[in-house]
Amino acid sequence: MRLVLSLAALGLLGLALWLWGFGGATMVVRWAEAGQHDAQNALARGLRALRAGDPGALTALLGLCFAYGFFHAAGPGHGKILIGGYGVARQVPLVRLGALAVLSSLAQAATAVALVYAGVLVFDWTRTHLTDLAEDILAPASYGAIALVGLWLVWRGVRRAVRAPAAHHVNDDTCGCGHAHGPTADQAARVTSLREALALIGAVAIRPCTGAIFLLLLTWRMGLVWQGIAGAFVMGLGTASVTLVVALVSVTLRESVLARLSGGAGARHIAGVVEALAGGVIAVLALQLMRHAF
């Protein structure tokens, strides 16, 4: 198992070297932008076919929505930063991190639906109003929330690294009378995990996808309301397909490091350092995105 994880880590390091050392990241961004542009043009054609009642138009439209979400997520994005950084910082099971990736993408789609229909039905906003709100206000708010998550990971990692090793846990939540007098360690961990999950999902979901806004506005004007809502959530699944890969990479990278540690106080100190460093990367990248948004 250690050999597999070591080989996976070497592969990831090689990929990182290509991305940031040999211009691979620029190539990926250009490819994603071209694919996103093509998918958006195809979406407009697909909507016209759907309105005309062409057979199979809805299935084709949903496929294009998934493709748009995939290409949109393949470029620079805050969701990948948070999911990937959190997977490196915390020892999270892959299934749980994958669920967070999917739920955050679907929550982002739900934000787009709520924003568009509140805007057009309550405030009579145009596409310009909605996209300006998404890009000028909600995007910086999302970056700020992600930066706060990163700083929180830094604080917790530093505290974990510098504190003396904790004594072995004694389960003193019962006194022999059969009644619990406090939460167990597992119960407390589940509460913390739930709070972390809600924080991560909320930080990503604050900013809706502009592609989903574009789709929802067009379908609303064409009288294709439920089709547009379905398309927005399928876009979210397309986005999740990329963040799931990021989750897999981050968990593999962390496990490859942990597999080389023998456990004990030294391992706990190193784990704290890794958490603090990953949190710092999250915070720095999020703050850079916030600066470019203004």
Image: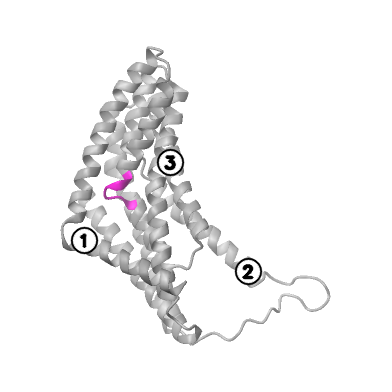
Residue at 38 percent of width and 74 percent of height: 274
Disc 1 residue type? Trp
- Secondary structure beneath dot 3 equals helix
The picture quadrant where one finds residue 269 is: bottom left
Q: Position of residue 149 (x, y in %)?
A: 40, 61
Quadrant housing residue 131:
top left
Question: Going by the picture, which residue comes out furthest to the top?
Answer: 52
Magenta-drawn segment: 73-78
Q: Earlier in the sequence, mark 2 or mark 3?
A: 2
Residue that mark 3 sits on: 237
Kindly state the secondary structure of the residue where label 1 is placed. Answer: helix
Mark 2 residue element: helix
* Residue 189 seen in the figure: yes
Q: Nearer the viewer, mark 2 or mark 1?
A: 1
Per the image, the residue denoted by label 1 is: 18
The answer to the question of whether label 1 and label 3 lie on touching residues, with beta carbons closer than 8 A, is no
